[in-house]
């Protein structure tokens, strides 16, 4: 797996070296992932309520003496506050899902730790209630919104582009599916011992690669807020801070908590980094950092030390 260029070369090289070496170890202990996490799939679909207008597109291109294909005219079929709220809600749902889980494979699957599973399900249930509530608001106001669109769009209005209320209802979809992650020895197929052994070894390597990808994902998500924190704390008394936000501390702590819950194989290096960061930031507040130069300097020094020592800690 290629590393992003946003990382210092020393860190990137250490990541790559560790990933390479780990797959070459003859003895590879793979934990029971099913006892620590579940696979979760999130699927959300909402109607965009936008449409490309071919006739208006041709008119714009002709009026401006432009070449065919150089422009497209997209129109809003309806203008709805509830639909705008839905767009924001779906974005926040996907962000929450991404922030509370780690990647598992190349097909978009994610893992949620069993430690945080209940909180994750409760939060997603609340978000789902908001989703269907907004969907109903959109449906209730749809006939009026279509009538308004006829006035707003003028000659661009086309009644054939508007589905019925029931057809529109079917376009709202929400699915959250949880599945257990099979263990290495979980092969219930009628095949020969040799083939079963080969399958187990292949799956063992797949699990090792995916656990490695989880570690790298945690590291990538940790480095960026740490670097922002270091930069935000880099000012002296009397100077105006740049990039200092109240979220400097909370953003790092959220990743620290994720490191605790998603340390799938109890990796000592991840635990060490997590504990070091927790010790550094426990009791530290944005106002405290602003008002106490010594606290600010000590925190920055500790954060810089953690960033510098990430390779030696085993990531």
Image (cartoon, rainbow, N blue to C red):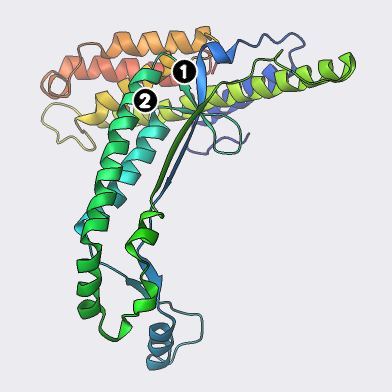
Foreground disc of the pair 2, 1: 2
The N terminus, quarter of image: top right
Disc 1 target residue:
262
Q: Quadrant of residue 305?
A: top left
Furthest residue in direction front, as rendered: 166
Q: How many labels does the image show?
A: 2
Q: In which quarter of the image is residue 3?
A: top right
Circle 1 Cα neighbour tier, 10 Å, few/some/many (<14 / 14–19 / ≥20): many
In the image, is residue 87 above or below residue 221?
A: below
Do the residues under discs 2 and 1 have CB atoms within 8 angstroms?
Answer: no
Q: Residue at x 50, y 18 (%)?
A: 37
Position in image of residue 232 (x %, y %): 25, 31
Determine the secondary structure under disc 2.
helix
Q: Which residue is drawn at 39% across and 27% down?
A: 100
Position in image of residue 127 (x %, y %): 29, 36
Disc 2 target residue:
121
The C terminus, quarter of image: top right
Q: Which residue is drawn at 51% across and 80% down?
A: 69
Viewer-closest of 259 and 293: 259
Q: In which quarter of the image is residue 58?
A: bottom left
In the image, is residue 208 above or below residue 58?
A: above
**Between disc 2 and disc 1, whose residue precedes?**
2
Viewer-closest of 1 and 78: 78
Q: Residue at x 32, y 82 (%)?
A: 156
Position in image of residue 117 (x %, y %): 40, 19
Circle 2 Cα neighbour tier, 10 Å, few/some/many (<14 / 14–19 / ≥20): some
């Amino acid at each position: 797996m290629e590393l992003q260029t946003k990382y210092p070369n020393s860190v990137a090289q250490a990541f790559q070296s560790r990933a390479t070496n780990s797959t070459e170890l003859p003895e590879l202990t793979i934990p029971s992932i099913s006892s620590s996490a579940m696979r979760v799939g999130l699927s959300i679909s909402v109607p965009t309520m936008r449409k490309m207008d071919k006739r208006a597109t041709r008119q714009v291109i002709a009026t401006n003496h432009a070449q065919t294909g150089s422009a497209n005219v997209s129109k809003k079929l309806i203008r709805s506050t509830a639909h705008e709220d839905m767009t924001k809600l779906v974005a926040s749902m996907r962000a929450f899902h991404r922030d509370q889980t780690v990647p598992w494979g190349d097909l978009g699957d994610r893992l949620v730790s069993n430690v945080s599973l209940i909180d994750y399900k409760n939060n997603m249930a609340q978000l789902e209630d908001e989703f269907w509530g907004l969907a109903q608001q959109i449906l209730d106001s749809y006939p009026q919104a279509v009538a308004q669109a006829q006035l707003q769009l003028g000659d661009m209005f086309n009644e054939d582009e508007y589905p019925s209320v029931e057809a529109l209802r079917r376009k709202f979809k929400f699915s959250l599916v949880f599945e257990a992650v099979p263990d290495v020895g979980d092969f219930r197929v009628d095949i020969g011992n040799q083939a079963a052994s080969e399958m187990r070894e292949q799956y063992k390597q797949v699990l090792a690669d995916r656990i490695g990808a989880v570690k790298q994902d945690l590291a990538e998500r940790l480095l960026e807020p740490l670097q922002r924190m270091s930069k935000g704390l880099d000012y002296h008394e009397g100077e105006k801070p740049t990039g200092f936000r109240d979220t400097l501390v909370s953003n790092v702590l959220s990743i620290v908590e994720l490191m605790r819950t998603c340390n799938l194989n109890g990796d000592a290096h991840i635990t060490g980094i997590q504990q070091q960061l927790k010790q550094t930031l426990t009791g530290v507040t944005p106002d405290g950092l602003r008002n106490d130069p010594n606290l600010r300097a000590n925190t920055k020094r500790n954060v810089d030390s953690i960033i510098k020592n990430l390779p030696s800690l085993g990531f």
